[in-house]
Amino acid sequence: MEYLGEALTLGFDSLIFGICLKQYFHYRNSMKAVKNAEIYDIGENLKLIINDRPEKKIEYVALRGTVGALGKPLYGVHDKSISGVVQKLSVKEHVVARTTAGFWSDQERTMQEIYNTVPFALRQGKHSVEILEPLSAEILDMDVISDEFKPSAPTITDHIWGFFTGVRQRGLQSTEEMLREGVTITALGEISSSPESPEKLILQPPLNTPFYLTTMSVSSLLRKLDERRRIYRYLCLMFGAIGLVIGGIVVRRYWKDREEQRLSEQLRRSLAESRKERRQRVREKDLREDQICVVCRTNPREIILLPCGHVCLCEDCSDGIDTDCPVCRGPIELKNAAYIV
């Protein structure tokens, strides 16, 4: 408990540092994977290249094409003229909540989030590549086609209830996003021949590399990943430096406390030796048998043991005897100085 504050601070800093470091390595490895990705045009040559591979697949490839549904597309909820292949519907509640400090702040909560998808492919001319599991993409760029905010009309009862609960509703925000047909995107993933039809190509999430469906080009994607990598690098350096400072403070305090304990113990031993020498100088030499310590048989009896009441030890020997009386073997609860005349 002595270093609880420093330990909690160091632990919190280490947690943030670990998260930032994990993200840094993630984006660094993602950049390396994107740089090493094979870039091909969607066409007949791509099928020939895949068929020449041993497992009929390319583990990581970058393709660019136009989005098109393989069947009936999805249509916008508010605008039926907009069609797409991936749709995201979300409802957020905007509230004004009272913080622990007593201030009111704007907050938002996601109440509902729904994804709808239909089979689609990337096309270049008459050739196409079907995209599988688009929702597992790390980056899935979609356009916002509808964003509506409906403010609430609270009553007096709602105001009173919100004052006591600390939450006042401002309104609901409904957002619709869609990956529209006809949009040109860049897809990075694993491409292979379809097991059902060898002439059909499919692009799916790879095993150990990121899956992207983005409107950015490969170079723009690399710049974005590099920007995030640098941000997490700076955060790692900052929180790492903070951790080193906190660790240095803890180590310095621990060393200082140990040094104080060592000096205190050294002073205690020095005082004990000094007292022992003073006692030795003032002790009588010619003692009767009943006045000699039963342990060392040299020094006079100076300590009474309670509750048995035996006066049988000198002060030097009493320091090492704390449990049983050497005469009656009774338990020792208390030791006091005694004087025999």
Image: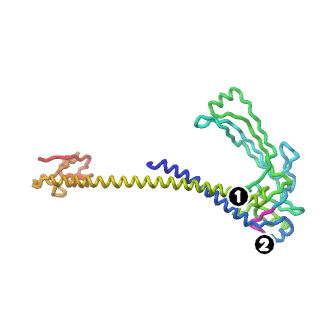
Q: In which quarter of the image is residue 71?
A: bottom right
Q: Does the CB distance between marks 2 and 1 fall below 8 Å?
A: no
Amino acid on which disc 1 is placed: Leu
Q: Is the magenta stretch mostly helix, strand or loop?
A: strand
Residue 28, position as x, y percentages in the image: 67, 61
Q: Is mark 2 on a helix, strand or loop?
A: loop
Residue in view at x 74 percent, y 55 percent: 139
Amino acid on which disc 2 is placed: Arg
Is 297 part of what is drawn in magenta?
no
Judging depth in this view, the residue of 31 and 294 nearest the camera is: 31
Residue 233, position as x, y percentages in the image: 63, 57
Residue in view at x 65 percent, y 55 percent: 231
Residue 225 disc label: 1
Color style of the picture: rainbow
Judging depth in this view, the residue of 273 and 80 nearest the camera is: 273
Judging depth in this view, the residue of 195 and 98 nearest the camera is: 98
* Residue 321 in view in this figure: no
Q: Is 187 on the left or on the right of 285, as rendered?
A: right
Label 2: which residue? 53
Residue 232, position as x, y percentages in the image: 64, 55
Looking at the image, residue 284 lies above or below residue 60:
above
* Residue 160 in view in this figure: yes
Residue at the outermost top position: 156
Residues in magenta, as a range: 54-63
